[in-house]
Image (cartoon, coloured by chain):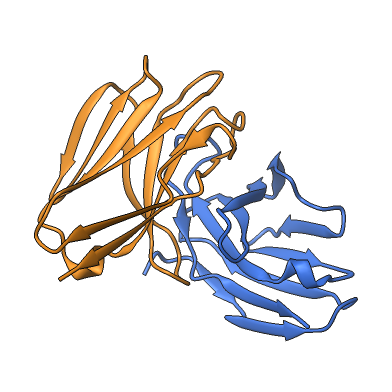
Chain colours: A orange, B blue
């Protein structure tokens, strides 16, 4: 989606912490989803933020600032299996009932 | 396993042909969504059905059509296929019709048009 910005690629080391940023522009806002997608596989749901602040779920946390049109996904204690694309999908960009995904950030975790 | 099933897993066909992709939503989900993901492209929303009725439409080509049946399974029909239609086609389902509902994705159908 042209109104969603994420870095194209990131690399990190096993055991480290990485933050994947997403900025968006939307008319109307109903929250923001993060999905993980391994190459050739289905996207899987990670988190949904509708209020400002940080939501923690195990090794993954997601932050939202509605006033800034900004979110990030924080991955801690990185594992090799975290190598995947991470898709940001704010609601409101495409209109009601349309979940519009960003192009995704491809994360490579190295030993 | 999300509980969403899609068949077939792979499909190889020729230009000009027509194919049908099938999706069964998770038990209890009333909405079905279709997405296209071309190589190195993001997920592109095609269309949504809720309880048998079309609910939202994305950039779906006129050559493509979909429907949702009374048992809630859905089919995506792609006709007059072109090389550029080669992609992964995902189906997702959610409980309700609202866009705040979490969508759960099926494993996808990989379509190759030769």
Nearest to the observer: residue A50 or residue A13: A13
On the picture, is A60 further left or further right than B80?
Answer: left
Across and down, in percent, residue A83 comes to 29, 65
On the picture, is A72 further left or further right than B62?
Answer: left
On the picture, is B104 further left or further right than B109?
Answer: left
Across and down, in percent, residue A25 comes to 51, 24
Residue B32 at least partly seen? yes
Which residue is rendered at x = 42% and y = 66% of the image?
B3
Residue A2 location, quadrant: top right
Which residue is rendered at x = 13% and y = 64% of the image?
A14
The quadrant of the image that shows the N terminus of chain A is top right
Nearest to the observer: residue A41 or residue A8: A8
Across and down, in percent, residue B58 comes to 70, 43
The quadrant of the image that shows the C terminus of chain A is bottom left
Considering every residue shown, the one lying at the far top of the view is A67
Which residue is rendered at x = 13% and y = 50% of the image?
A58
Measured along the vertical axis of the image, is residue B56 above or below residue B27? Answer: above
Across and down, in percent, residue A21 comes to 33, 38
The number of numbered discs placed on residues in the rendered structure image is 0
Residue A67 location, quadrant: top left
Which residue is rendered at x = 70% and y = 71% of the image?
B86
Nearest to the observer: residue B15 or residue B34: B15
Measured along the vertical axis of the image, is residue A41 above or below residue A74? Answer: below
Residue B101 at least partly seen? no
């Amino acid at each position: 989606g042209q109104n969603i910005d994420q870095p194209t690629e990131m690399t990190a080391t096993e055991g480290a912490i990485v933050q994947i940023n997403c900025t968006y522009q939307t008319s109307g806002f109903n929250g923001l989803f993060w999905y993980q997608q391994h190459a050739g596989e289905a996207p899987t749901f990670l988190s949904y933020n509708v209020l400002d602040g940080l939501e923690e779920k195990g090794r993954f946390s997601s932050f939202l600032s509605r006033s800034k049109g900004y979110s990030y996904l924080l991955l801690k204690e990185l594992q090799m299996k975290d190598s995947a694309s991470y898709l940001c999908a704010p609601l409101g960009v495409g209109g009601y009932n349309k979940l519009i995904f960003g192009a995704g950030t491809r994360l490579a975790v190295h030993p | 396993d999300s509980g969403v099933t899609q068949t077939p897993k792979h499909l190889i066909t020729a230009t000009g042909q027509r194919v049908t992709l099938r999706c069964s939503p998770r038990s209890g989900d009333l909405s079905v969504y279709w997405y296209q993901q071309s190589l190195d492209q993001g997920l592109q929303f095609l269309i949504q059905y809720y309880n048998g009725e079309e609910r939202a439409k994305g950039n779906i080509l006129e050559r493509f059509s979909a429907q949702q049946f009374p048992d809630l399974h859905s089919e995506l029909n792609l006709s007059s296929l072109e090389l550029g239609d080669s992609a992964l086609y995902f189906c997702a389902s959610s409980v309700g019709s609202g866009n705040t509902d979490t969508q759960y994705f099926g494993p996808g159908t990989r379509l190759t048009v030769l």
